[in-house]
Image (cartoon, rainbow, N blue to C red):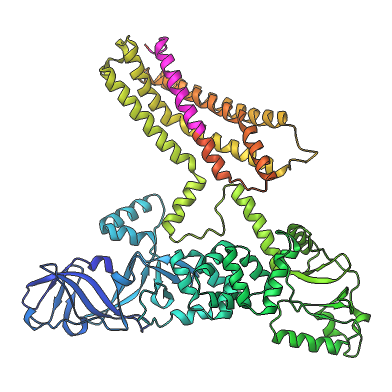
Amino acid sequence: MQYFSQMVGIPVYDSKGETLGRVKDLGIATGEVFPRITSLAFKGTGAEPFMISWRKYVDSFSDSAVSLKVPAEEIRFSFLQPEEVLVARDLLNRQIVDTHGLKVVRVNDLKLSQSGTNQLRLLGAEVGVRGILRSLSPHLENAVVKVAKLFGTDIPENIIAWSYMDLLDKQLKDVQLSISHRTLEQMHPADIADIIEQLDPRLRSEVFAQLDVAQAADAMAELNEDQAAEIVEDMDASQASRVLSEMNPDDAAELVNELDYEKAEALLRMMGVKEEQAIRQLLGYKEDTAGRIMTSEFLSLSPEKTVADAIAAVKDAEKDEREMTNYLYLVDEHKKLRGVLSLRTLLIKNDNEKLSSIMEKELISCNPDTDQEDVADAISKYNLLALPVVQEDGKLLGIVTVDDALDVLEEEHEEDLQLAGAPSTNDKDNGAGSHELRRLMTNQMWFFFWAAGALVMVLIGLGALASSGVPLGEVAALSNAGAIAGIAFLAGGWSGVLAMPIALLMSDSMINYTTNFFIEHDADDEDKPSMLSFIAHGVGSAFIYMLLMVLIVLGLLLFMANSGIFPIHVPVLFVGFLAAAVTVLISYFTSPLYLNVLYKRAERGKDTSRLTMRFISDLFSLVLFVGLTYLFCYLAFAIGLVA
């Protein structure tokens, strides 16, 4: 077993032992379960690129060299065949679909296996962190793996077999991968949507081009509105119109609403009259209401029909692929809703029974102006598969299905998550590395502020000390203000490294406290605690935390004093934690400002990210902490607390 990264750059020798160049790339035949290496591309001693047949010329290979069967003068160079690709040029660092794991990954390395005496085959792609480390240096990979084992952690290889790989870059228009298009066509629309959301924007339209109209319509309905709109904007107008026509009216209306007005009008005019009318009717209702998310595709019959008539109608509806046939709605000649029947009821009744005698007359319904969240709550509360939408006069306009209700609940949950600073479930990242960085930024933002702040404080302290011109060993003899300021700045940087995380973590805690209060209590909530109570509870919690911190600091001071540590450290440590304590208290006193911002933005219908508020709060706490630390350190030196 070996990796492609280990072969790149190794020398190529002819049969006489003369160096011809160094390995640059390998060609593979794509139409095999485990593709064999068919070509060897190497860079000559004069940097000229060459390509030769692997089977015809390669005699042996190892981790250190490739040896050929013939002398240099007998080699005949070849060209890449239509069924071949170059692994470095066409696979390495490319996005691929792991059709087994249903996710988009990036190829960091390629795993090879020897087959026979001189045959090499491609097993799959390395998509984990070890591939990145190995590409930088095999020694670095080994070192990281060994260090991880010391801490009881294993860094496994993450290999995707070639049979599960689907290459997505359509720049390779002449390459026919054996499993690519067929595999995508066999996937569920929701899985296709998940994959598309993880892709680079430039590749999303390329994947949609592989799907037929029905598949594209089903997958489009599973995408979030913004990404679906971007894809439609890039599509040919006639193709986009066909996809919209194939979608359920409620899904199509939601997508059209996200498009540019001129683009939307052009696509609507290209549709059939029936589809255009259905979409325009839905667009006529207010956003976030039952009318906007209902579908006009439902099954209805007269109450005077029989069970046999209803079963026949259900069969016809299945042929037309109606969205909902689990319920049969019974309407009179004026289209007013009179009752409802489930398919189960139809199956257990006699064929000649009239529907009016077996229908359920106690109905749960809503009007088109009902808030969509109330509709979703009703469907959830009463365990319904669909909720009829009726006018004030009782006329049935459409139904809201359970899948649309789930979408509404998911959107509501997503808004709460974003407010809480959690990563968006719709925000699919293209690479594991950037995903982990984003996760770290989201959950551990304080760490980045701490690293930046501590570095700045230390640099300022060293600069101030250097400008004073006094060596660090002569601190005890200092008396002039410039030297005192220099030592104070250096000591401030030292104490900031220790105490700053407390100020930043408590700043995050304040934001969590504020946003949780906002989520639990609406602005017009009569039982909401007063602002004074809100402040008192927050500051009281901070004060208790500060008291615990003081006890810990006193313990540290006693330990340092008894250990004979250089006396400058003791008061510096104290003032650093004092600055953190004051910063935390001031931070909690600013919590009403954040709470008022949340309420005011909510009144205007705007969402506020907890992540953004944490950034502002951490930045404020950092600046405040740095200022207080320098001030307290300078005062400690100036008034002679440090001899």
Q: Residue at x 70, y 85 (%)?
A: 320
Percent x, y of residue 609:
58, 46
416 left or right of 171 in image: right
Q: Quadrant of residue 268?
A: bottom right
Instruction: Specify whether 281 is left or right of 432.
Output: right
* 625 is within the stretch colored magenta: yes
For the point 65% across and 59% down, the residue is 410
Was residue 635 drawn as part of the magenta stretch in this picture? yes
- 558 in relation to 23, above or below: above
Observer-nearest of 506 and 548: 506
Q: Residue at x 40, y 83 (%)?
A: 178
Write down the quadrant of residue 377 in the picture. bottom right
The image shows residue 106 at horizontal and vertical percentages of 39, 65
* Residue 244 visible within the image: yes
Task: Tell me the magenta residue range.
Answer: 620-642
Left or right of residue 484: residue 355: right
In the rendered image, the quadrant that contains the C terminus is top left
Which residue is pictured at 60% across the width and 64% down the height?
261
Visible in this render: residue 505? no
